[in-house]
Amino acid sequence: MLPAERKRRIVELVSDSDGRSVEALSEDLGYSKATIRRDLRELEDRGLVERSHGGAVPVTSVGREQPYGEKEVQNLEGKRAIAARAVEELGDDQVVFFDAGTTTMEVARNVPSDGSMLGVTNSPRLAIELNDEDNEVKLTGGTLRRRTRALVGPTAESFMQRTNFDLLFLGTNALDVDAGLSTPNEEEARMKELMVEKSERVVLVADSSKLGRRSFVQFASFEDIDLFITDDELDAALRETLESAGVDVVDGVAR
């Protein structure tokens, strides 16, 4: 197989499966992992794929929304490191909101089981995780979005407008110096806006795959965030922008 043909095939496999690991591509095509990695670097430079932890995903548009199951298996090590640091922000007798998402799910798996908090969420799966502990749990109610397994819509928004929270663990699909925090879906963006508005302290938990990206709907600016925890080290420009907006930054937690 000629190099150009191999690279075309890589793009096809990555696109058809909505993401592919280096190991799988190596097995599919019969080339070494080193060769596949070199190809992926070139294809990313040409804007044909996006490299991810251990592989590649299709090029992201601002409207693309990954299914929950796809995100659930990406960069688990980084998300778990973020979660381990995030639970240090918990205090006694707090009302804590957990945004729906795979990183916030890891945070939920790390909370103390001593009944010291009231957990609130718009994620039925996350509520089940919290309910395994001794803490009281409340769901927002609303309409379940199958793609992200988050509750949204008028019922969920009404709940948010009537409640207040000491602490919010917030996720995002994208974080960009100019565009702030954004997500592909308008209903989820509205829920996130309300989470931020109704919370005394906002802790953003997002792995490095979200950095430098834009999605369809902005739901918060950096000024809305109190603390940002991420797995990799930030570049100097992004760190300066965040800190100028008053955000405390904890980065490189997976190192």
Image: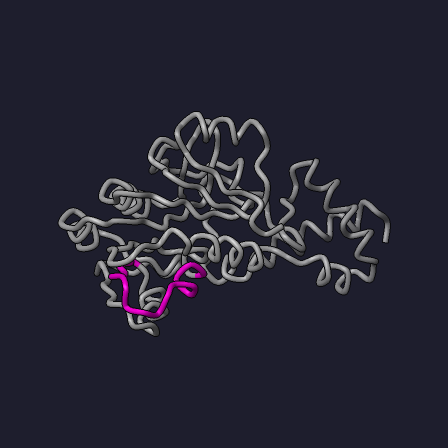
Residue that protrudes farthest toward the front in the picture: 92
Number of marks drawn: 0
Please provide percent x and percent y for residue 133.
Answer: 33, 72
In this view, 121 is above or below 135 = above
Q: Which of 5 and 24 is in front in this view?
A: 24
Q: Locate the N terminus by quadrant.
A: bottom right
Q: Which residue is drawn at 52% across and 31% down?
A: 239
Please provide percent x and percent y for residue 203.
Answer: 38, 45
Q: Toward which corner of the image does residue 223 lie, by quadrant? A: top left
Q: Which residue is drawn at 55% across and 46% down?
A: 209
The color scheme shown is: one colour
Q: Nearer the viewer, residue 162 or 144?
A: 162
Q: Residue at x 77, y 60 (%)?
A: 26
In this view, 113 is above or below 201 = below
Please provide percent x and percent y for residue 57.
Answer: 60, 50
Please provide percent x and percent y for residue 19.
Answer: 60, 55
Q: Is residue 11 left or right of residue 93?
A: right
Residue that protrudes farthest toward the left in the picture: 162
* Residue 114, magenta (yes or no): yes
Q: Nearer the viewer, residue 172 or 39?
A: 172
Q: Is residue 144 left or right of residue 21?
A: left
* Residue 76, magenta (yes or no): no
Give the magenta range: 106-122
Q: Residue at x 22, y 44 (%)?
A: 198
